[in-house]
Image: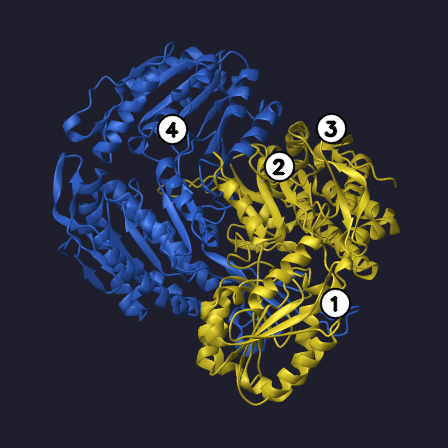
Chain colours: A blue, B yellow
Amino acid sequence: MELLGTSIIGSSRSAQGEKTFSGFNPRAAAPLAPAFYEATAEDLKRATQLAAQAAPILRNLPPARISEFLLAVKDEILALGDALLERASSESGLDTVRLTGERARTTNQLAMFAELVKEGSWVDARIETALPDRKPVPRPDLRRMLRAIGPVAVFGASNFPLAFSVAGGDTAAALAAGNPVIVKGHPAHPGTSELVASAVAKAVAKCGLPEGTLSLLQSTEPSFSIALVQHPVIAAVGFTGSERAGRALFDAAAKRPIPIPVFAEMGSVNPIFILPEALAERAESIAEGLFKSVTAGSGQFCTCPGLVFVVEGEGLPVLLKKLGEHFTHGLPGTMLTPGIAKAFEDHFQKAASVAGVSAHRSAAAPNVSHTEGQPGIIIVDSKTWFENDPLQHEIFGPSTILVLCPSTAELLASARALSGNLTATIHATPAELPGFKDLLDTLTEKAGRIVFNGYPTGVEVGTAMHHGGPYPATTDSKFTSVGTASILRFARPVCYQGFPQEALPAQLHDGNPLGIWRMLNGTLTRD
Amino acid sequence: MELLGTSIIGSSRSAQGEKTFSGFNPRAAAPLAPAFYEATAEDLKRATQLAAQAAPILRNLPPARISEFLLAVKDEILALGDALLERASSESGLDTVRLTGERARTTNQLAMFAELVKEGSWVDARIETALPDRKPVPRPDLRRMLRAIGPVAVFGASNFPLAFSVAGGDTAAALAAGNPVIVKGHPAHPGTSELVASAVAKAVAKCGLPEGTLSLLQSTEPSFSIALVQHPVIAAVGFTGSERAGRALFDAAAKRPIPIPVFAEMGSVNPIFILPEALAERAESIAEGLFKSVTAGSGQFCTCPGLVFVVEGEGLPVLLKKLGEHFTHGLPGTMLTPGIAKAFEDHFQKAASVAGVSAHRSAAAPNVSHTEGQPGIIIVDSKTWFENDPLQHEIFGPSTILVLCPSTAELLASARALSGNLTATIHATPAELPGFKDLLDTLTEKAGRIVFNGYPTGVEVGTAMHHGGPYPATTDSKFTSVGTASILRFARPVCYQGFPQEALPAQLHDGNPLGIWRMLNGTLTRD
């Protein structure tokens, strides 16, 4: 399929912009054809008009139609074939093996939501039937369920050009809930975005849905993103990226005359705590697992463990030696963009230049003309870590900071000093874990997911996942951006009082024709 | 029980403030003894310290202990006896019959949450057991449930001195979820607040809970409210009141370095739409029901219907005649505070002075020295309504605006022009309702609860209620402030990966020892 360098607004292409930008191949350090037109204010107007028209239609579709549509999107993405993987690889520097896996995650997510919507119980239907004779006042018939929130703006993420971009997790969840979506494509992969949006447009046409079901706006301008978030038609926002950009969107949404929710998944240092017995028992395997988790995908996962706290004691020399060996042999890897590669290096150097730390890089020098990042580890005592801000924040890339604590009290104090995180991890023997209740409890307060004797990278997509956490991990710790529960971001309850059956959504009808789980007069039932 | 005019911080009294304020009896138009000390910055510091200490203890309590505590609060409130009703009546102008009902609602809410917590399924537990042999990667054991969000600031509401104040719906929901609460008492009923907070303190002591479980801070200063919302220890806010005050708290929370959610239930005009056949059939009974709903509690309910849209046609003369009669015979009623009475009169006069409207007041003049509000109705054509802002906003008090639409198209256009609301109501015959799908759909977008052939006042407290709605009805349309689902405001998911059983909360144990509903490998079950 030939790329046209356009935004895709409903069923039309738009190339109105006077300015253009290009994708960039980080492995070749070269721009990619074609040039992409920056979306204009007129494009935004048209996309929001179409979304507003689509919203009531999508909201009222039978769940089976939404489900079919999500599966059609899946099929159209697969039908793009290798062209999609190749373009995504050129634009992101990620290899096609990884991208094949990411495509599978993307299509699995669509299938997962198709199944969730078809099953139907996610709407949390609650019915209280009338009690006309109740004293002192009768009870009316009340029927409440979740309904679509309205048009959702989704911002593509640089590090998941498929799974968190045009038809990624946020979009799938928003569509599944019955909302139109306007995607602001990430400028690092405009071609990938165009391909996927064209696939979605095909699915929209095949399923007979309104063309405003999804639009893709291509832009590099922060002001355009703000205008999208502040447009009156937009009802909610999904975002994955940096704390700076996420906070800017959050602030813009909070300042609207009618504020809207922003579900931004942002920065996280994903701390790991290694307790004494675990260290003594298996320092070597922890070193290996840690190195793999830190350098997976060149350290460009939200869940990359950027801080490791360890109590000095038996096993520490082995841990240090093995970590040294792993990082020495670590291979530089292509980063997503030159900007990300530079930021990684800058932040690493800033941390490495703090007095009292020791920094260790891989032996192989990075090929800068291939936009490579060089794995590295910084070792610091907990007192120095406490006192130096550059050691406390996320360094996005293949590095971690190992903090040596003189005592378990110091380790606990470090945990208490942390900000919010997507994940926190404890390595411990089952025998010593009960002695660290305070640590587990502190991490319960600080993180969305707590991992025992594992590594935070590798986020399972299912019903029990929570990929979220206290700020700055996200702007709303009550919601996940991964798994079935992520649909709850894009719906709100509506209660119908005293309505005749035929005016109600099928989910609330007597006799439960859709066979969903409902809370009926206080009892959960499928009857 | 003698009132001491203090804040109640944990188990201590504080009378540090140099400034004082007093309650006011609106019926007697006279201040009430004693003077109350304004809470100080030191009081806030102490209350937040105690809340921070209490948070991990409450979070980890067995559900049965929380449940017992809520019932103990109920008992202690009842043990205050008539003194509570009398003080609340003096401070609010509400009669003791209404307040006896409101006390019952308050204690019923506590009992409802006690039952919800004891039953336990509200935590939305989701378990995916490990699949060690899954290809290409194993699935880890994942167990996710809702946990307490952290210390909650609750702002008492003037119009519900019991049910939305110190131990009202927000507090009950926050405590039930396992959070400490700091209440900023409403300055209109400081004595009622002191009595209820002292009852809670007794329950805290009897149940052996940490003293920081609840504190009451008495203040009239907006800057104190902002300081409370911006205190780093506070994790969420519950508020019921005006749009202006709610938005100020929302803005303050959004500007924090670490933003927190504000669940503010604010302004709502609660529109009613009377369709032609219903008007022709039962104009007289609609006039009666509408008048009762508008003037209930002197129009000081969040759900008071402030706008009524009707299509000119058969039945309209009867509706106008009967409404005229009802309002003529309407009796002035005591308003909550002189400020509310004045604001009501000012806003009504402003609306009544718009060119082209006709306004009608009750025959009986209000006794201003009894802080009375005079029932009133304004009648206006839809064109004039569209063009005049003072006719479009909530007028808090016993009045409504009847908008005459020349056609059903005009009625629909009016619905589309509305902002968000807690409720919207349709009066229609079952036969004509299917012809107004667009109207119902528009109201689904604009309101949290849609009432058929009823009136919005009288909010059922149960599982199926949604008392919320798009802005400005609330600052977060995804949550209700009434009913069991309101607990969801004060909890967030935490996912445990790979942990040994004994380190997990009982809700997530194998074998389901608490017998709660859980999503186990994708299937809802109590096994």
Spatial CA distance of label 4 from label 1 is 63 Å
Contact flag, marks 2 and 3 (Cβ < 8 Å): no
* Residue type at numbered disc 4: Glu
* Residue type at numbered disc 2: Phe
Q: Please, which chain is the residue tagged with disc 1 on?
A: B
Q: Is residue B159 above or below residue B457?
A: above
Q: Can marks 2 and 4 be said to lie on one chain?
A: no
The disc placed on residue B332 is 1
Q: Please, which chain is the residue tagged with disc 2 on?
A: B
Contact flag, marks 1 and 3 (Cβ < 8 Å): no
* SS for dot 3: loop
Closest to the camera, between mark 1 and mark 3, is 1
* SS for dot 1: loop
Q: Quadrant of the C terminus of chain A?
A: bottom right
Instruction: Determine which residue is flagged by label 4.
Output: A394
Instruction: Determine which residue is flagged by label 2.
Output: B224
Q: Left of A29 or right of it: where is B228? A: right
Q: Please, which chain is the residue tagged with disc 4 on?
A: A
First-in-chain label (2 vs 3): 3
- Quadrant in the picture for residue B159: bottom right
* Residue type at numbered disc 1: Pro
Q: Residues within 10 Å of mark 2 (few under 14, many from 20)?
A: some
Instruction: Determine which residue is flagged by label 3.
Output: B16
Observer-nearest of A402 and B148:
B148
Contact flag, marks 4 and 3 (Cβ < 8 Å): no
